[in-house]
Structure formats: C-alpha cells, structure tokens
Image (spheres, rainbow, N blue to C red):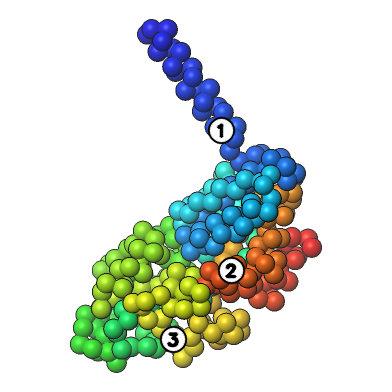
Amino acid sequence: MSKKVYGLIFLVLITLVFLVGCGRAPEGQNEEQEGAYIQIKGSDTSVNLSQMWAEEYMSKNEEVSISVTGGGSGTGIAAIINNKVDIANSSRDIKDSEKKQAEDNGIKIVEIAVAMDGLSVITNANNPVKDLTVEEIGKIFRGEITNWKEVGGPNLAINTYGRQSNSGTYVYFRDEVLNGDYTANMKRMNGNAQLVEAVKADESGIGYVGIGYVVKGEKVVKGINILDVNGASPLKAENVKTGAYPLARPLYQYTNGKPTGAVLELIKYELSDEGQELAVREGFYPVTEEYSRRNNENLGQ
C-alpha cells in the first residue's frame, strides 16, 4: 500500500474521531449552556414540533446547538437506552422491557410529558362517515369490517393505512384501539405526512395520525375528514384535556436521569407558556395539570 493511501486512511480515521467527539456530550458535560450540543431523536409525530422548539430556543440561545431527527419512538427509545442521545421523543409509554434494558445499561429513565395529542382517525374528505366508535375502528383495522356500508357509508371497500412497527403511534393504536393485530391488508406508510397524502388520494381510505399533521393554524388540512370517536372530536381542546376524546395521549421526552444544564433549560422552555403556545400552533395541546404535576416530580421542581 502506498504512502498516499496510508495517508488517506489516517485522514479518514482522524475525521471520524473528530466527528464522534462532536457528538452527544457524555453525561454531565451538558451542565453548562455555553457550547452545549443537544441531540434529540425519536417519534415522527413529535419531530416537527421538536424541531420548531429547537429552532426557537437556538434563536434566543446562540451558544446552544440542537439536532433533531425522527425515525420513530422505538428508535429514539433505543438511542436513549444506549446513551446515544440526550433526549428521546416518544408518542407512547416506554415499555417495562425497555426500562429493564436501560437499567442493565446503567441508564435511569426520566419521563417528561411535553404536549398532548388528540390522535386523529382520518378519512377522505368525500367520505360521508363522520363518527365511529372505538369498537368500530378496531374492527376496521383488524379486518373484521371491510366495507364502508357496514358503518353507514357508501358500498365501498375500506382501505386501511397505518405506520411501521417502530412507530409509537402504531404501537399506541394497536394497544389502545385494536386490542389485537392489524389486518395484513393494511398499507404501512413511512411517516405521518405520507399517510395523510395517501388518504387524501383514496376515497376508500382511513388512517390515523398525530393531530399536528392534519390541523394547521386551527384549520383542518384540505382533503381530509377528522372523525369524531365515541361522539367526541379531537378538535375541541376540552375533549383532549378531560379525556372525553378517547384517543387523547401525552407526547413524551425521555432523558437519562434528571436533566441538568442545557437539557433542563431546553425542557423548561418547551414547558413554558411560550413553548406550549408553539405546541398549540403546531396543532397539539398543552400539557394537562395531571401531567404537569408528574413533570414537576420527575424534574424535581
């Protein structure tokens, strides 16, 4: 091997070492704001909201850099379990098995609810069905109801759209609505935006997404119906706050231990009046009093 090739390999190795060094700081190094670098990964439902928070926070705190990526709640939780990120975004509760993995890795999981979601069941705007029960939705996504005429709609075969298995929304919907397995005929989409576009284009379609993907500026995006579930609409904040809407859920962030320094300051910003107003602007809802109490306990505030 020539000296030139050896030199090139050395340069690549040095570059890799430098890039690794620029990644998430080891525990404790983010205790100061100055020069802090925060990595956030996980839920696709939360990624746009998290990105907005990060951009607004960095505009006011130029000494802090924040990286936000999606990939699904399972991906984010795996990253915090392996101490690869500072914050994991998740649209579902962390599983007991995941907590055990974290403990085995010396990671102490701390949970913070940062916004509320009225997980929305959506259909094409031309579909006359406006209200379904949780039981009916479960039967549709299990493949037991296959035609819209069975729930008061047109004589039209139902096409179901859902998410991949690493999605927190996929898991939440399966556990809370289906109480069983999805039909093998469900089309699995790579993200919420793709799912919304698929239902827009399919008069037979039905899917489920975080409400932030179908409500912008307090208006429902064109081409979509957001169904009432058990007679309650997720478009009414009170329904999500009180739980009258049965698919209301918290959006979480998980950290390794009680957050400190720059990570704590970012989370405090997200939970501030300004941060919660940004969540509403993105179509989500503020954290309820119940979850605020839990947050204060978990953050030691």
The residue where tag 3 is placed is 228
Amino acid found under the numbered disc labelled 1: Val
Viewport quadrant of the C terminus:
bottom right
Looking at the rendered structure, the secondary structure element under dot 2 is helix
Evaluate if marks 1 and 3 touch, with contact meaning CB atoms under 8 Å apart.
no
Residue farthest to the right, as pictured: 301
The first of marks 1 and 2 along the sequence is: 1
Which quadrant holds residue 208?
bottom left
Residue furthest top as drawn:
2
In the image, residue 260 sits, relative to residue 148, either above or below, namely above
Relative vertical location of residue 295 with respect to residue 74 in this rendering, above or below: below
Q: Are marks 2 and 3 in contact (CB under 8 Å)?
A: no
Specify whether residue 232 is in view. yes
Q: Which residue is mark 2?
A: 279
Tell me the CA gap for discs 1 and 2.
Answer: 32 Å
Disc tally is: 3
- Badge nearest the viewer, 1 or 2: 2
Q: In the displayed structure, would residue 273 be above or below residue 79? A: below
Q: Return the x and y of residue 265 as percentages of the image width and height.
A: 72, 55
Image coordinates of residue 212 in percent, x first then y, are 49, 70
Relative to 123, residue 153 above or below: below
- The structure residue drawn at horizontal position 32% and vertical position 81%, both measured from the top left corner, is 125
The quadrant holding residue 146 is bottom left
- Which numbered dot is residue 20? 1
